[in-house]
Amino acid sequence: MPAFGAQKDLVDTIARGDFPSWTVKIQIMTEAAAQTYRINPFDLTKVWPHADYPLIEIGQWVLNRNVGNYFAETEQSAFSPGNLVPGIGASPDKMLQARLIAYADAHRYRVGVNVNQLLVNAPRCPVHHYQRDGAMAGMSPAFGTDNNQGGGVNFYPNDRVAERAPAPVAEVAKPPLPI
């Protein structure tokens, strides 16, 4: 697919081996501090003062290769703030709360109900969840292409926990957040 303008510049830069990168930083505030802080920390029109909550570098984001298949790796990619690591919960920021629903919903409409099973979006470690059947089911090697999770149940609670049906794990539950 031909690239134009800024996209062409980016593709050419990566092809030359001059990989663009960004430093990723975060700010951390405890839940207790959020309750009494002088500004509403969940108001997206406010910036947390760096003097109170300094930026903490957590890594680098590097674009180190161009895509090999534009459709499979770009057009079908789906990013959602709802894809959280177990044990991490979302803040009560109203904009984030809306995006948790809207992004995933838009991707399901745009790409299909099994958007997270496509190789570009699939987790790199085994995941046991309720997503199966429907369009594009079982297309990703990450989930296996042979039996689409077999005849196991895809709902909770169920009476087949012994059959490796998904069930909540208390150790990675979202932290409670009083709202």
Image (cartoon, rainbow, N blue to C red):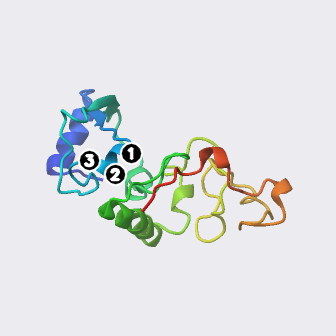
Q: Is residue 129 left or right of residue 161?
A: left
Q: Is residue 117 left or right of residue 170?
A: left
| Mark 3 surroundings within 10 Å by alpha-carbon count, few (fewer than 14), some (14 through 19), many (20 or more) | few
Q: Where does the image place residue 46, in percent across and percent down from the top left?
A: 18, 52
Q: Which residue is mark 3?
A: 37
Q: Where does the image place residue 70, in percent across and percent down from the top left?
A: 37, 51
Q: Where does the image place residue 100, in percent across and percent down from the top left?
A: 41, 62
Taking depth in this image into account, of 134 and 46 the one nearest to the observer is 46
Q: Which residue is mark 1?
A: 32
Label 1 with label 2: CB-CB less than 8 Å: yes
Q: Amino acid at mark 1?
A: Ala
Taking depth in this image into account, of 177 and 36 the one nearest to the observer is 36
Q: Residue at x 71, y 68 (%)?
A: 155
Asked if residue 73 is positioned above or below residue 107 in the image, the reply reads: above
Gap between marks 2 and 3 measured at Cα? 6 Å
Q: Which residue is mark 2?
A: 35
Q: Residue at x 24, y 29 (%)?
A: 16
Q: Is residue 52 left or right of residue 145?
A: left
Q: Quadrant of residue 79?
A: bottom left
Q: Amino acid at mark 2?
A: Gln
Label 2 with label 3: CB-CB less than 8 Å: yes
| Mark 1 surroundings within 10 Å by alpha-carbon count, few (fewer than 14), some (14 through 19), many (20 or more) | few
Q: Secondary structure at mark 3?
A: loop
Gap between marks 1 and 2 measured at Cα? 5 Å
Q: Where does the image place residue 123, in percent across and percent down from the top left?
A: 55, 46
